[in-house]
Image (cartoon, rainbow, N blue to C red):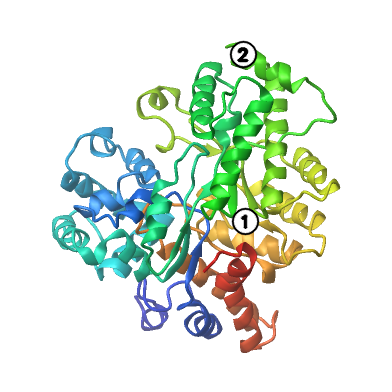
Amino acid sequence: MSQKEASMHRNFLDDNFLLENGYAQKLYHDYAKTLPIIDYHNHLPPDQIATDWVFENISQIWLAGDHYKWRAMRNLGVQEHFITGRANDSVKFQKWAESVPYTLRNPLYHWTHLELKRYFGVEELLCKENAHEIYQHTSELTNSPEFSTRRLLEKMKVEVVCSTDDPIDSLEHHQKYAQNPSAFGMYPAFRPDKAFAVENPISYRIYLQKLGNVAAVNILSYDDLLQALQYRVNYFDKNGCRLSDHGLEKLFHFNGNTYDIHALFKKVYSGLLLTEDEEAFFKFKTLLELCRMYHAKGWTQQFHLGAMRNNNRRIFQSLGPDTGFDSIGDFPQASALSAFLNELDSTDQLSKTVLYNLNPGDNEILATMCGNFNDGSIRGKIQFGSGWWFLDQKDGMEAQMNVLSNMGLIATFVGMLTDSRSFLSFPRHEYFRRILCNLFGKDIQQGLLPNDEKWIGKIIQDICYHNARNYFQFPI
């Protein structure tokens, strides 16, 4: 390496990681770095927060449930026994450590080392040779009161966490936590996907029985279903819920009563399969009714659109969902999404809405769709959500922020969320903030933005924290 090349070289993961010039560094270190975190969508287990759970070792908190890592390990030929199988935790960590050096240029490489550094002070790059030493060091820390679930969230200055909860969930852990809270708030988010998952009549009827039990409703008709859902919406609202969430391939829309919804309910309840169009109509009609319930409560609704799930049927049968066999779908989004939002808007029942896409080809569609329904009643009422799942990496986040800037207003953006099942995933907010500050810093350097540090710093702080706080109105 020449002297000139050496002078230009930056150390990996130094204080100015991802920050390419002085403007970006100033914005991050002086305006973004120390702000609290509002994590309004994740999949953390509420029971582990309520009980202030302490994990036995690093593998239990870091590898269990993380299908991002599982997917990479399978790609490298690691056998399932060492991923989700019965291998002991130290061996599973060893296999992950051997995999990490091969994840270069995948966001896992950044996340892995950010998490090791921020939580455990580990500066070394994880690999086969140091795996045992790092496993012992991190596991000793993990298995201590200072690394309990609550302490980990407090360490990252988390102010709010919102779990993802089925309508049948008792919310007992949220209630327990509320009786003895920590420095952050924990709130449920209503995820009713199973309430209209009519593809399998047998499993759907079993779910209806469970829903009816918790709602004290014998669900024998479509009206009974809506009554039970309203009961659970009321229950969630009383327990601090302020958001709903839906994981959908796409939204549906039909004009008028194309089908008799009551007859469709009876058909599926009796064990008969619906046609593809009948399924779509049932989902459309039920989701529409739910969205009206949300509006009445003042909730925000989230739509995660475009995932093609459980592609590998053979492995799905043995491991189940959310195990690393999902991908980006190419479903049409614009027409039905517009009509669905318009139907709610036409009766003034369109809630604050966050739209997430998994297919990057839909970036411009969603960004411009938001502008159709921002009516001036609420600042940033319809949000183009942050890069999600396969898109929550540097290129994906930059693309989302650039499209939002060009076709909407990034100044009203409610920012990042972890969407994670891991208590060690919160450096993703740091990752996002560094990328955000670098975008603005590069524009200042190129003369595309004025060198107005205070104003741009305010915009940065709004995106990282204040917009979300004002938008969701959590009782912080």
Element type where label 1 sits in the image: loop
In the image, is residue 234 above or below residue 266? below
Whole-percent x and y of residue 2?
36, 79
Upstream in sequence: badge 1 or badge 2: 2
Q: Nearer the viewer, mark 1 or mark 2?
A: 2
Whole-percent x and y of residue 342?
82, 45
Q: Amino acid at mark 1?
A: Gly
In the image, is residue 421 above or below residue 374? above
Whole-percent x and y of residue 112?
34, 59
Residue at x-position 73% and y-position 26%: 281
Location of residue 468 by image quarter: bottom right
Location of residue 312 by image quarter: top left
Badge 2 is on which residue? 273
In the image, is residue 407 above or below residue 307? below
Tell me the tag on residue 195.
Answer: none
Q: Observer-nearest residue: 395 or 222? A: 222
Q: Quadrant of the N terminus?
A: bottom left
Whole-percent x and y of residue 179?
39, 59
Judge left or right: residue 227 versus residue 371.
left
Badge 1 is on which residue? 385
Q: Amino acid at mark 2?
A: Leu
Badge 1 density bin: few <14, some 14–19, many ≥20, Cα 10 Å: many
Give yes or no for contact between labels 1 and 2 (Cβ–Cβ under 8 Å): no
